[in-house]
Amino acid sequence: MSARLSVTQAAVSEITLMAWVDVAEPGARLVYHRGFLVVDTTPNVSMLGKPALEDLRATANAAYRLSELGRIHLVQERLGSDRFAYLAIARPQKVAVRTAAVKQLAVAA
């Protein structure tokens, strides 16, 4: 399964994730974080600096909202002990649903 992952070293921002969803073909995958999300987004536990932690929390929250809107599936792949790849997998959408989802995300942000 790892050979099919679209993994980049750079952090995926909230804006990048939302833009990707609008152009992604159904089944397309995006790794939006590698690590242990609950630890990496918890202040006083995370090894990330405050700006990176806040950016990761925003990205994770956007991924959750997109999942709740039916835009993506959220999947984890174990990479090792306490290390995971967090994937967004694009779901098939109608054009009208995309527009409504983008409006809802803008209101929620």
Image (tube, helix red, strand yellow):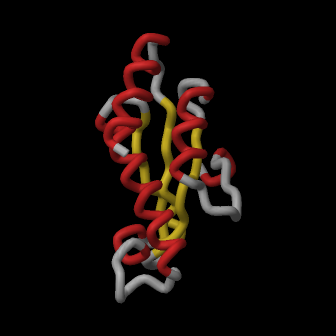
Q: Please state which of residues 85 and 8 is positioned toward the viewer in this rendering.
A: 8
Viewport quadrant of the C terminus: top left
Q: Please state which of residues 10 and 1 is positioned toward the viewer in this rendering.
A: 10
Residue at horizontal 54%, vertical 44%?
17
Vertical position of residue 39 compared to residue 56: above or below: below
Residue at horizontal 57%, vertical 54%?
13
Vertical position of residue 85 compared to residue 42: above or below: above
Left or right: residue 30 versus residue 99 is right
Residue 57 lies, in percent from the top left, at 41, 63
Residue at horizontal 50%, vertical 32%?
90
Residue 70 lies, in percent from the top left, at 35, 29
The answer to which image quadrant residue 71 occupies is top left
Residue at horizontal 48%, vertical 79%?
50
Residue 43 lies, in percent from the top left, at 35, 81
Left or right: residue 50 versus residue 8 is left
Residue 28 lies, in percent from the top left, at 59, 34
Viewer can see residue 95: yes
The answer to which image quadrant residue 101 occupies is top left
Viewer can see residue 80: no
